[in-house]
Amino acid sequence: MQRKAIALLSGGLDSTLAVKVLLDQGITVQALNFTSPFCTCTGKNAGCKSEAVRVAEEFNIPIKVMNKGLDYLDILRNPKHGYGKGMNPCIDCRIFLLKKAKEYMLESGADFVFTGEVLGQRPMSQRRDTLRVIEKESGLEGLLLRPLSAKHFKPTIPELEGWVDREKLLSIQGRSRKEQFELAAELDVKNYPCPAGGCLLTDPSFVGKVRDVFDHSDELNLRDFRLLKLGRHFRIGERTKVIIGRNDAENQLLEQAVQPGEATLRWSGGPSPLAAVMGESSDELIARAGQILLRYAKAEAGAEAKLAVYRDGCELEMTTVNRLDEAAVESLRL
C-alpha cells in the first residue's frame, strides 16, 4: 500500500530536499505552504509562496497555500514559549503550523507529516528539547518525520511500520549547509533561491513597526501587517499612521490598500510621492500627514503648499505650510 504524507514546503533548500528524499522512496506527497507578512524570503519577482509552488510543480505534487491568519497574530502578540532575539515566536509558530498540518493530514487522508527541519540549525526552534516540545504540543507525536536529521532521533511510526526506509534517511545536523548542498547535487535538485529562509520578526527596525500596530489598534487585521514592508511609516495620532511610498510601485499598492474613511494625498505643486493616511483621518491629521509628505517632495521650506486629498471617492484641495524640518519628521518616524 502506497503511503501519503503532508510536507511543510517553504520552497527553500531544506524542505525541498526533504520532499525529494521521500518522493524517491515512493511516498505520495502533498505539500502545504504558509504565507506570512513577515517572510524575508524572496525569489525573482515572487516570494516564498511562489517558490513553494514552483517546487511543487517541478516535483508534480499538489500544494495547498494557506495564510497564517488572524489567529496567528494572537500567538504573535502573546507567545506561550516567548520570543527569540527579536519578536520571533519561533517555537509557538512551529507548533501553530504543525497543528494546521495535522488538520490537513486528517482531512486529506494522509498518514504522517514531514518537514525539512535540521537538528541544531536554528538556535531557538531546532534544539533537541524544543523539537520534542513542538512535536508533543502539535499533537503529532510519532507522526512527525524529519528526513534530513531522522537518524539523530528515535524512529517514528512511519519508520517502525516500514512506510519509509530509515536507512535511506539522513543524519544532518548543525548550521552548516555543506551537506545539504552536496545532497542537492546528488539528487539533482536545482534552483533553490532561499536556502536559509528568514523572518522579519528578527529585525529590530521591523519589530518596532509590529509593536506599534499592536499598541495602536482596536482590532487587528492582516492588512496593517502586510503594509509594514512598504514605504516610510510615521505615527501621527493614537489611531492614525501615515505611510509614504518610496517609488511608483509602492504608491500604487498603498493607494489600493486604503479603506473607507482613510485618505491618500499628494503635493499639487510638482512631483510627489503618495501618502496614505491609515486609521482616523480628520482634517487636522491629514494636514499633519501633508507636512510630512512635503519633506519628500520638492516643496519650498516654510511656504504654503496645496495638497490633493482623496477620501471616500471624493477629491478636495487642502492648503498647509511646509514647516516641519527633518528632525521633526524623524521624531514621528517608526
Image (cartoon, rainbow, N blue to C red):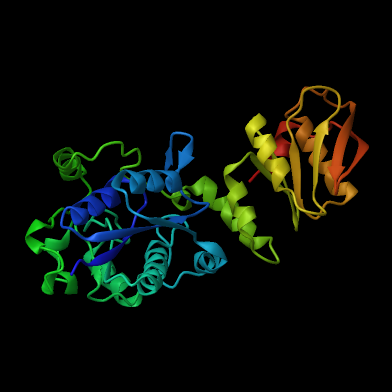
Q: Position of residue 319 (x, y in %)?
A: 93, 34
Q: Is residue 121 visible?
A: yes
Please give the count of numbered marks on the rendered protein. 0
Give the residue at x 66% y 30%. Answer: 248
23 up-or-down from 6: above or below: above
**Compared with residue 2, is residue 323 higher up or lower down, i.e. above or below?**
above
Quadrant housing the N terminus: bottom left
Kindly indicate the quadrant of the structure image that contains residue 169: bottom left
Horizontal side of residue 318 vs 51, given as left or right: right
Left or right of 16: which side holds 250? Answer: right
Direction from residue 81 to residue 77 in the image, left or right: right
Looking at the picture, tell me which residue is in the foreground, 299 or 311: 311
Q: Nearer the viewer, residue 91 or 311?
A: 311
- In the picture as drawn, the residue positioned furthest to the front comes out as 1
- Residue 75 location, x and y as percent? 50, 68
In the rendering, at what x and y percent does residue 318 appear? 92, 37
Q: Is residue 24 above or below residue 158?
A: above
Q: Position of residue 243 (x, y in %)?
A: 69, 42
The residue depicted at 47 percent of the width and 53 percent of the height is 201
Q: Residue at x 72, y 29 (%)?
A: 296
Q: Residue at horizontal 84%, vertical 31%?
A: 322
Q: Is residue 331 visible?
A: no
Q: Along the line of sight, which residue is nearer the eye, 105 or 302? A: 105
Question: Quadrant of residue 70 in the image?
Answer: bottom right
